[in-house]
Image (tube, coloured by chain):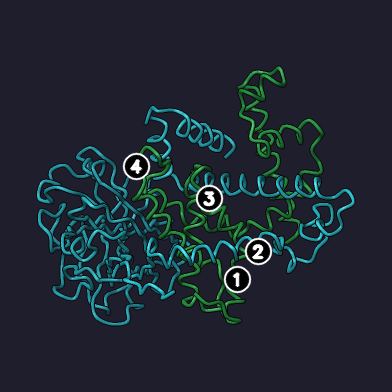
Amino acid sequence: MVHSPSDRPFLEALSRHQPALEAFCYASLGRREDVPEVLQAVVIRLWEKSADWDTSTHFLPWAFAVARFTLLSHFRDKSRDRLVFDEDVLLAVAQETERAAEQFEARKEALGSCLEKLDHEQRRLLNAHYITGQGLRELAGAMSRSESALKMTLLRLRGQLRKCIDRQLTQAI
Amino acid sequence: MDELDGRLQELLEKALTQSDPGPRNELNRLLRENADARRCIARFLVDEQVLLSRLREESLAAILTPGSVGAMSLLPNPAKAKHRAPSALWRPSLAAAAGLVLGLFSASMVFGSGLLRPATLKVHRIELANPGFEEELGRLPSGFPVRTGAWSGDESEVVEAKAPGAAALQSGRALRFVHAAADRPAGLAYACDVYQLVDLRPAQALSRGAPSTLDFSAAFHDGRPAGSTLAKISCRIYVFSGDPASLAKRWPDAQEAALTTALGRWESSGGNSEWRRVETQTVLPASAEFAVIHLAAWDSSQEGRPPAFGQIFADDIHLSLLSQTPQTLPVPKR
């Protein structure tokens, strides 16, 4: 496979939108452990089909269509107990997933301001759970709190952040 | 919406952590039946990825910031990010781009070794009986179909383009939904349903075991005046294995036995001069033998009286098989 200057728009679009594609894969799978393998397969498939992309059109709708087929192949290869969603549900949710993933960069940008409004303890909890990957049981022990109380705190925090992002984006319009 | 969010998150967590299939099945059922749930789960999971991505960036930036100007230039500065122009928001780190290119080179090597084969997408039209309603004018047979190759259902009729309310029809004939009927003897009548059984075995032969989807679409026209009651107009496909002739006796309960199903829907309050194409897709399971394609007009605003549709039409029904066919690739010479 030879790279040429004509690959540049494709590579730029792919590097720009790879986080949104990752979000699309995660939202379609529901299981984080499976994302790297599927994302890699999606990137390879996009690369193989890069000549089909009309650079005068938006990259993401085309990329999501390719990703959807890669996900379906993944679904066929996996036993049902490894899958969170049924195939028909994956397809039924796909449109909403695409719509949400298209807003990935805008939502991430808005999240920056929202995170600044959190207090130290809330930030510490988010970092411990999402960056260092500590489970709820482990965190509950370390923070001398019950697992269910911590789960509720995280749930509320996520809801708070979601509303803040929505507000930021509404104001931006 | 918060309550639904909480319910979905609870089911998702249980589906991921418990061996009991109950929560997984309940989650899938909820997502099949509830459009709000589909919207919530998509947004929840994408937002989780947004959060993870942002926290990772900020965490990396915090590690690399002290005295490391070069390293910082590779990463977005979260403190300044919100002041950037929208056009610059997407820029990923150079490291990520480099990783991507390296990944692609690696992929091409695997590709060359023959472990991975690209695929082409093939589209085959599946033959339907009377897809444009051109064959015969008049009422459709009533009841659920007992054999493939014919439309039947609730009170509906094939009309000419010049029929009242069908002014927007371009040519030929179309199906007119007339009256709703109840699915069960004591049930309420909200929908006018029309069905056709379709043999999928030829489609299975065409797919040759490759991952495939069925694409089902129909054109609809709502000729009622603007401000009419809200009608839900839909095309739906159910995929089954087994004997299609036995389905009529068990419909609508037999819907539960469908291997997959998919729904495309349009909500209209009239005032449309154009036709609207509604489509939906579902996978073709390996065991699929036949499908039920279902056209419907639905209105629950009539307070128990069966709604009359009269000016809602369907036409130009398509069912296609989209399958990925592996290509044979030449192995590059070294």
Residue closest to the far right: B67
- Rendered view: B257 above or below B205: above
Q: Secondary structure at mark 4?
A: loop
Alpha carbon separation for disc pair 3 and 2: 16 Å
Q: Secondary structure at mark 3?
A: helix
Alpha carbon separation for disc pair 2 and 1: 8 Å
Contact, mark 2 vs mark 1 (Cβ under 8 Å): yes
Discs 4 and 3 share one subunit: yes
In the picture of the structure, the residue carrying the numbered disc 4 is A79
User: Identity of the amino acid at label 2?
Assistant: Ala
Q: Secondary structure at mark 1?
A: helix
In the picture of the structure, the residue carrying the numbered disc 1 is A11
Residue closest to the far front: B334
The image position of residue B103, as x and y in percent, is: 56, 61
- Rendered view: A127 above or below A96: above
User: Identity of the amino acid at label 3?
Assistant: Pro
Discs 4 and 2 share one subunit: no
